[in-house]
Amino acid sequence: YAEVSDLLLFSRDGKHIAYAASNDRSIWPTSEFMVMDGQAGPKYQSVTIPYWTADSKLVYAAIQNSQSYYVLDGIAHLAWGAKDGEQIVGVPVISGGHCIYAAMVKNKKCVVIFDDQLQGFYDDTGTTGFTRDGKHFFYTAKLDGKWQVVIDGIAEHPYEFLDPSVVYFSNDCQHHAYWATDNGKKFLVTDGKPGLQYDPFPVNTHPFFSNDGAHLVYIAERDRKDILVVDGRERPAVNGYIPDCGPGIFPFFSPDGKHLFYSIEANAKTRLCIDDE
C-alpha cells in the first residue's frame, strides 16, 4: 500500500489484526480503507482509527461522497442525518447490539446519537461510551458554555468545566464520579452530587471505588498538601505526596472493602499505610 497507519490493533481474542491504509495520494480521488487480516476492505474517501468490540468485531467510521457511515463487522451503516451533511466525530462505540457516537452537522452543532435516535444538539462533545456491563450509555457534552454528563439520556447538573474525556464507574457500574469546576472551586461529583470544594489544583487524580461500590477514595490538594478523602470525609493533610498511579495501585481498598491501602512519599522515602497506620 502507498501508506499505512502507524497504529495496528489486535482483536480482543488475539485472532485478528487491523489497520488503516490508503492508495497513492497523488492520484485523485484518493481513497482510504481498512485492512483486516491482510485483506483490504471497501474504499472510502476517509476512515477513522478502528477499534474492536468485546466480541472481536471491527468498528470504524468512514466518509464517502460527503456522507458519513459507521462500519461494523464489514457492513456499512448510514449515519443519522448523513444526507444533511453530518460528519462523524470519533469512532462509534458498540456494545451488546447498541451503538453510540457523536457527530457534527452543517450548522457546526454537535449531536449525540444512540441507536439511531437523536439525544440532543450541543456546542461540543467529549467522550461517548458504555459501562463495562453494557447496561448503561453515557457521554459528556457542552451546551451554552457549560459541560454536563449524560447517563442513559438523563443530563446531570451542568458545570463551567469538567474533564470531557473521563467518567469513572464502580466495578458494579452502579456508581460514577467525575471532576468538575464551578465558581472557581474544584470538586468531585459522585452519582450526580458535588462533593467537598477545593481551590483548583493542576492534576485530576483518579477516584477509586471499592469492589462492591460502597466506598470511594480520592486525593485532593489544599495549600500544596495532599489530602485523602474517603467516603466524602477528609483525612488529615499529609506532609508529602500520595501517589496516584492508576486503578488498583495507590490508593485501593481490600477485596472486602473494609481496609484502605495507600502510600506517602516524603524526604526520598516511601511509607506504606493501611487504615492510617
Image: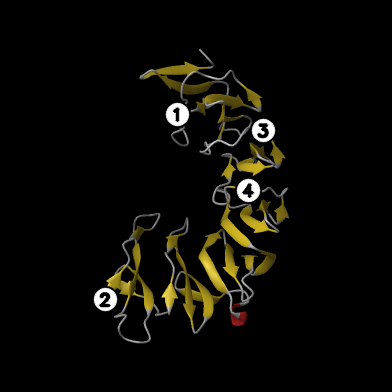
Which of the marked residues, 3 or 1, is nearer the chain's N terminus?
A: 3
Which of the marked residues, 2 or 4, is nearer the chain's N terminus?
A: 2
Which of the marked residues, 2 or 1, is nearer the chain's N terminus?
A: 2
How far is mark 4 from mark 3, CA to CA? 14 Å
**Which quadrant: the N terminus?**
bottom left
How far is mark 4 from mark 1, CA to CA? 25 Å
Q: Could you tell me if the residues under marks 4 and 1 are in contact, i.e. CB atoms within 8 Å?
A: no
The residue at which mark 2 appears reads as 2
Q: Residue at x 63, y 77 (%)?
A: 81
The residue at which mark 3 appears reads as 197
The secondary element bearing badge 3 is classed as: loop
The secondary element bearing badge 2 is classed as: loop
Residue closer to the observer: 115 or 160: 160
Q: Could you tell me if the residues under marks 2 and 3 are in contact, i.e. CB atoms within 8 Å?
A: no
Q: Could you tell me if the residues under marks 2 and 4 are in contact, i.e. CB atoms within 8 Å?
A: no
Q: Could you tell me if the residues under marks 2 and 1 are in contact, i.e. CB atoms within 8 Å?
A: no
Q: Residues within 10 Å of mark 1 (few under 14, many from 20)?
A: some
Q: Residues within 10 Å of mark 3 (few under 14, many from 20)?
A: some
In the shown orientation, is residue 59 left or right of residue 172?
Answer: left
Q: Residue at x 60, y 33 (%)?
A: 212
- Amino acid type at circle 4 is Phe
Q: Using the image, determine if residue 224 lies above or below residue 101.
A: above
Which of the marked residues, 2 or 3, is nearer the chain's N terminus?
A: 2
Q: Nearer the viewer, mark 4 or mark 1?
A: 4
The residue at which mark 1 appears reads as 243
The residue at which mark 4 appears reads as 161
In the shown orientation, is residue 270 left or right of residue 86?
Answer: left
Q: Nearer the viewer, mark 2 or mark 3?
A: 3
In the shown orientation, is residue 233 left or right of residue 93?
Answer: right
- Amino acid type at circle 1 is Pro
- Amino acid type at circle 3 is Gln
The secondary element bearing badge 4 is classed as: strand
